[in-house]
Amino acid sequence: MSAESQAAPAVAAPACGRTIGPSLYGLRPVLLPLATAAAMLLAWQFAAVLLRIPSLVLPTPVEIGRELWRALPALLVEALPTTRDTLMAFGAASALGVVLAVAISYSPLLRDMLYPNLVFFQLVPKVALAPLFVIWLGVGSPSRVAFAGFVSFFPIVIAAAVGFAGAEPAALRLCRSLTASEWRCFMLVRFPFALPAIFSGMKVAMTMAVIGVIIGEFISSQAGLGFYILNAGSRLDTADVFAALVVLCALGVALYGAVALAERAVRRVYGRH
Amino acid sequence: MPVVEGNHCIEASAVSKIYRGGTPAAVEAVSSVSFAVPHGQFVAILGPSGCGKSTLLMMVGGLEPVSSGSIVIDGAPMTGPRTSIGIMFQDPTLLPWKSALDNVLFPIRVLQRPVESYRETARNLLERVGLDGFEHKKPHELSGGMRQRVAICRTLVYDPDLLLMDEPFSALDAISRDEMNELLLDLWQQYRKTALFVTHSIREAVLLADRVLVMTKRPATIVEDLAIPFPRPRAISIGESREFNAICAHLRERIEESHDRPRSRRTGAAREEPAP
Amino acid sequence: MALLEETGRQSDMTPPARWARGVLLPLGFAVLVLALWQIFCERMRIPPILLPPPSAVWAVLRDNYAILLEQALPTATETVVSFAVASLLGVALAVALTFSAWVREALYPNIVMFQLIPKIALAPLFIVWLGVGEKTATVVAVFIAFFPVVVSSATGLASAKPEVLQLCRSLAASEWQTFRMVRFPYAMPFIFAGMKVGVTMAMIGVVVGEFITVQKGLGYIILFAAGAGETATVLAAIVLLCGIGLALYGAVELAERAVRRWYGGEMPVGGVI
């Protein structure tokens, strides 16, 4: 994405600098996509009304908005267990993932032993294991936390391991030449160098944790947004499904945004690299 | 090579470039620069990093629009890129998946000329720059100097009238750089094309050029237009002569004079590369 | 997810002696885990409904392979079809984004937004629209696998070096020439990175789709067997799923290697998310 933002405007900038005033120019990257989204919603609304699409198949945005307003208290109650499970799963996966990555980065034997197996697990469809977690841990929250943690653990471990391995060799040599302890080398060099990779792993992990919890709720739960969506779907209350989806999307973006914000704060502390 | 008698190849009058014009963040990268280059002359534009000399070169090449002023090439006002101009960049910009020969032939493919009839030309050029036997190597198998040689061949293969070179050797080590300078002197002796060569190396400018234009930052303008008296063909050994060093010292003085604080480099303020 | 490629490339470069260690050690570790699992189940007398020993899973695979393969066929077909469709659509949209700055600026942020939200939660809607059947699982999978391919390909198509693009402009190359000769080849690594994520996503989509809709396929077998307490069958079906996933991933990997050879040495590693 960074390459996109650097290279793409080279074509567009000269033309639009003149057609749009300088004050609007800065806002264009924000306004244009928002306007597009709004236009699509409008088109949806008109299409649904003009083509008389039954609201069972595709409710209009206005209907969804009304439903959202009506069901919001219930949806927020359902969002609570989903959020809690996601955060617990993400926290556990992050902690375990980074710890294992540190271990891997310090022991070549451990790395050679585990890393290919981790990559293997990264590739296989882990969601298929969801029913097993229900067998092991029951239909309650622990099985979903464990499953979501399991799913989001692998991206973190792999990203962090790659990050720790990618520390500037010259900086490490400098650190050792100053006879710093291994611990100080880690805190001063390896860890800061690995931060961008860890955060990119955490961003993937956060989206995976939400997905894990939702799938868990699809197949086992009696509460949570996933349960609500499946339930509304089986009642063929499509507007209600969409209302729940809006809340879920907001939740997903908010959780992702929290990781992105944390990354920004940490980057400010360590300087950009 | 077609030569229009009595006419200048490049005529730039009062050329300016302002980025983000009309906003408080406006940056004047080039400020009312005028110069003319006759056909067959090798001109070096010398200046510190970030003084806007690359921007000027890109405007001459039609890759950047001018904010004000005009550029006339071969009697025709510049409106956009034209294929009578060959450009070399600091980076060799070879395509990593093409062999050296195919990289040289890249402009021929873009210009949709018959590739087969140029294959021999391309081979000869590669041989001319000492790369015979490397035609089928890919860029990652070549050294930095070799890659830049391929880039030279790529620029010459479609026989442009005007060569624009944007610090083409500044990323090379000192030894390769000397070799490349020698090669360029040699090639220029043979082809005698009009050339505009941007560099921040005083010695390189004096060694290669018939004429040196000194550009400075703030205001980004030309402060000196100096003819270099050495006869051609030149050998790289003229760099040891007293006269050569005197010219270099003079140019250095002119550059430093025009700075309030010598060697001060404001980062970020006026980037030399054309900012998007 | 793309980060792990880097390490994959490093292991390519290791000499044969290390290669043996790189392959045998992780395999040995996996075998060790299986052996411990077997012994653990036998010694502790773990009820097979909780955790069957590997030998029991093998027995299911051996005795019921005809039934399992019959169910694996629709799953494999759905996965391949959805992955192919998602890749084609994704690359096509990315190309469209490259050619129009307006389209790009209008759509790209919205696409990235979709990348962040838990799209799997939309699965019940597809049941409303398409009914319960193979088609639904396929469409869900396309929908999920599509976004990583678009984002990664669009990033790749914008990643050509600015100097090379300037070179093209100085030769008065047409947009199409620039695209064909420069932008697309430069994007290859990114397109492959996106497709690799797409493969795993398509797999997830198909499995989840089968969880909630279909009356056949490995996802259905897993859920059905889990409900019946036949955990060994669940694991056997998962083994087959892993087989399908790895085969497809391997096919993409092989295609990438071929392109890498054509590309020459320093093909950069594409990144997603």
Image: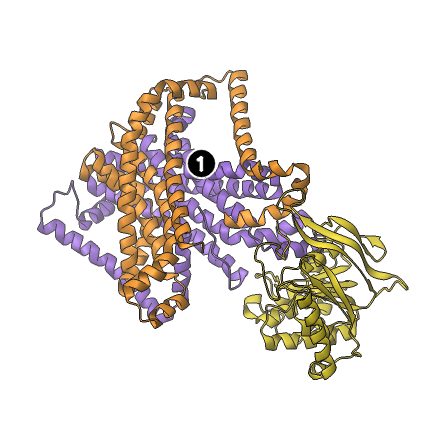
Chain colours: A orange, B yellow, C purple
- Among all residues in the image, which is located at the extreme right? B6
Q: Is residue A255 left or right of residue B275?
A: left
Q: Position of residue C263 (x, y in %)?
A: 54, 60
Q: Is residue B177 above or below residue C70?
A: below
Q: In which image quadrant can residue B271 be found?
A: bottom right
Residue A164 in sight in this render: yes
The residue closer to the viewer here, A70 or C216, is A70
Q: Position of residue C182 (x, y in %)?
A: 61, 54
Q: Is residue A154 left or right of residue A26?
A: left
Quadrant in which the N terminus of chain B appears: bottom right
Three-letter code, disc 1:
Phe
Q: Position of residue B259 (x, y in %)?
A: 65, 63
Q: Is residue A121 above or below residue C145?
A: below
Q: Position of residue C13 (x, y in %)?
A: 41, 67
Measuring 29% from the left and 58% from the top, which residue is drawn there? A102
The residue that mark 1 highlights is C143
Q: How many marks?
A: 1
Q: In which image quadrant can residue B169 be found?
A: bottom right
- Among all residues in the image, which is located at the extreme front? B260
Q: Is residue B129 left or right of residue C194?
A: right
